[in-house]
Image (cartoon, grey):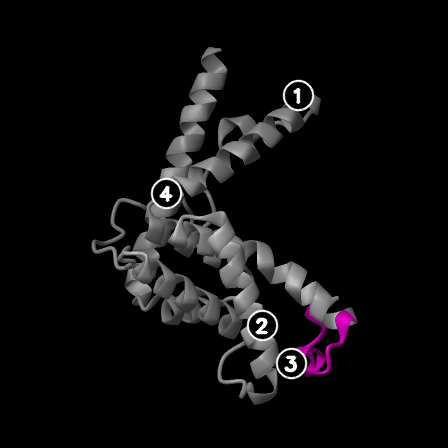
Amino acid sequence: MVQEHDDTDLVAALVHSDAHVSAPIYRRHTPTLLRVCTGIVRNRATAEEIVQDSWVAVLKGASQFEGRSSLASWLFAIALNTARSRAKRDGRSVSFDEFGDDRGFGAAFDGHGRWSRLPDLWDNVDARRIIEGRDMLSHVNTAIDTLPEAQRAVLILWSHKDLTSDAICDMLEITPGNLRVLLHRARTGLRKSLDHLVTRTTEA
């Protein structure tokens, strides 16, 4: 398992092309990389190209990795910088700054960022609920893709357990306060979408 190795082991595996370790690393990070980069460049094929180029850059530079950040942070920083440069080259300005404060956004969440009340559709688990849960997952993914660019990026990166909040702030060039605002707004937007789905399901 990848999590059994520290970054020194992982980098050594990349340097020596140890597929037993490097292949799980690739599978672990690539889906999140693709999703974030697609949101920035707005094109799946271009995002796939950026992610592949980022992995090549990591493999080529692994022997020079100094451990100033985690391996995951290094990889994501390369991909995000490349995606933002590509978007700029294509005439799109990409900024993750979103001003405001998080007052009024926390009622749906507890002090640890979890929902204080789950959507009604998840209260009971039976065969019908499992099917509805699959529909819910599809709806959640669609809702995430329709969030504003900054909120979507923060939410996706935050869900990746190998990235710390400090690393996300560094990658996106935002403050911790800005990160909290973006995360609250993204979660609140998702909650509204889920509540709307529950209302439609109940009335059907």
Q: Which residues are magenta?
A: 3-19
Real-space CA distance between mark 1 and mark 3, rounded to the nearest whole angstrom: 46 Å
- In terms of secondary structure, where does tag 2 sit? helix
Looking at the image, is mark 3 or mark 2 earlier in the sequence?
A: 3
Q: Which residue is mark 4?
A: 147
Kind of residue indicated by mark 2: Val
Looking at the image, is mark 1 or mark 3 earlier in the sequence?
A: 3
For this orientation, the residue located farthest to the top is 204
Q: Which residue is mark 2?
A: 56
Real-space CA distance between mark 2 and mark 4, rounded to the nearest whole angstrom: 30 Å
Identity of the residue drawn at 32% across and 69% down: 173
x, y percent for residue 88: 30, 61
Whether residue 162 is visible to the viewer of this picture, yes or no, is no
Magenta stretch prevailing secondary structure = helix
x, y percent for residue 28: 64, 60
x, y percent for residue 111: 41, 53
- In terms of secondary structure, where does tag 1 sit? helix
Kind of residue indicated by mark 1: Arg
Q: Depth-wise, is mark 2 or mark 4 nearer the camera?
A: 2
Looking at the image, is mark 1 or mark 2 earlier in the sequence?
A: 2
Residue 24 falls in image quadrant: bottom right
Q: Which residue is mark 1?
A: 128
Q: Which residue is mark 3?
A: 11
10 Å neighbourhood of mark 2: few (<14), some, or many (≥20)? few
Kind of residue indicated by mark 3: Val
